[in-house]
Image (cartoon, rainbow, N blue to C red):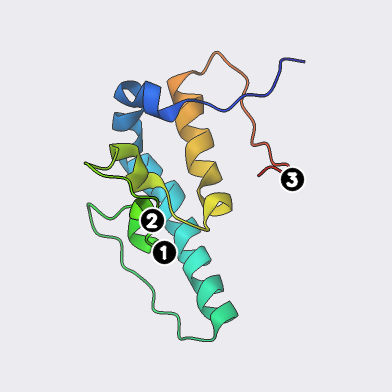
């Protein structure tokens, strides 16, 4: 079995960017993040208000935490950060798996989880 390694999204963004901006990805991540939002609302005791999908909406728009600047980072944000949502990694895994499978279909892909996340 080949060693498990993380896929370098930032280095492959020229190939991946068009995939992430496609309608297919929205059909994958949007229902997942709506479920995430509903669960978060239930867990924290506030009313869930569904978000209608509109073009330009990204997973980052579901963020409840401003982690992007919390470590003193300066300058423009990398574009791929738009498809990251703090605390919702398990709800975006299908999206990232789909994109990797489309970009490099000759490789076997699977979602891996561990104590190291």
Q: Judge from the rendering whether residue 106 lies leftward or rightward of residue 22; answer left or right.
A: right
Q: Secondary structure at mark 1?
A: loop
Q: Secondary structure at mark 2?
A: loop
Q: Does the residue at mark 1 contact the one at mark 2 (Cβ under 8 Å)?
A: no
Q: Secondary structure at mark 3?
A: loop
Please give the name of the residue rendered at 52% of the width and 26% of the height, measured from the top-left corner: 7
Relative image position of residue 50 (x, y in whole percent): 39, 74
Q: Residue tagged by mark 1?
A: 65
Please give the name of the residue rendered at 58% of the width and 16% of the height, measured from the top-left corner: 107
Residue 108's place in the image compared with 54, above or below, is above
Residue 3 visible in the snapshot: yes
Farthest-out residue, right: 1
Q: Nearer the viewer, mark 2 or mark 3?
A: 2
- What crowding class fits label 1: few (fewer than 14 Cα within 10 Å), some (14-19), or many (20 or more)? few
Sequence-first disc among 1 and 2:
1
Q: Residue 70, which numbered label?
A: 2
Residue 67's place in the image compared with 21, above or below, is below
Q: Judge from the rendering whether residue 114 lies leftward or rightward of residue 109; answer left or right.
A: right
Q: Residue 21, which numbered label?
A: none
Please give the name of the residue rendered at 61% of the width and 26% of the height, measured from the top-left corner: 109
Please give the name of the residue rendered at 48% of the width and 42% of the height, measured from the top-left corner: 95
Residue 38's place in the image compared with 44, above or below, is above
Sequence-first disc among 2 and 3:
2
Q: Residue 115, which numbered label?
A: 3
Q: Does the residue at mark 2 contact the one at mark 3 (Cβ under 8 Å)?
A: no
| Nearer to the camera, 49 or 4 | 4
* Viewport quadrant of the C terminus: top right
Q: CA distance from mark 1 to mark 2?
A: 10 Å
Relative image position of residue 92 (x, y in whole percent): 50, 48
Q: Quadrant of the rendered structure where residue 6 is? A: top right
Q: CA distance from mark 2 to mark 3?
A: 24 Å
């Amino acid at each position: 079995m080949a060693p498990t390694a993380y896929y370098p999204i930032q280095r492959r963004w020229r190939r991946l960017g068009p995939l992430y901006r496609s309608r297919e990805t929205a059909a994958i991540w949007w229902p997942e993040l709506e479920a995430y939002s509903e669960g978060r609302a239930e867990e924290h005791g506030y009313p869930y208000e569904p978000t209608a999908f509109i073009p330009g909406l990204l997973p980052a728009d579901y963020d409840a935490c401003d982690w992007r600047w919390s470590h003193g980072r300066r300058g423009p944000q990398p574009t791929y950060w738009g498809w990251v949502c703090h605390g919702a990694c398990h709800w975006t895994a299908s999206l990232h798996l789909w994109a990797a499978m489309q970009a490099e279909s000759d490789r076997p892909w699977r979602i891996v989880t561990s104590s190291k996340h």
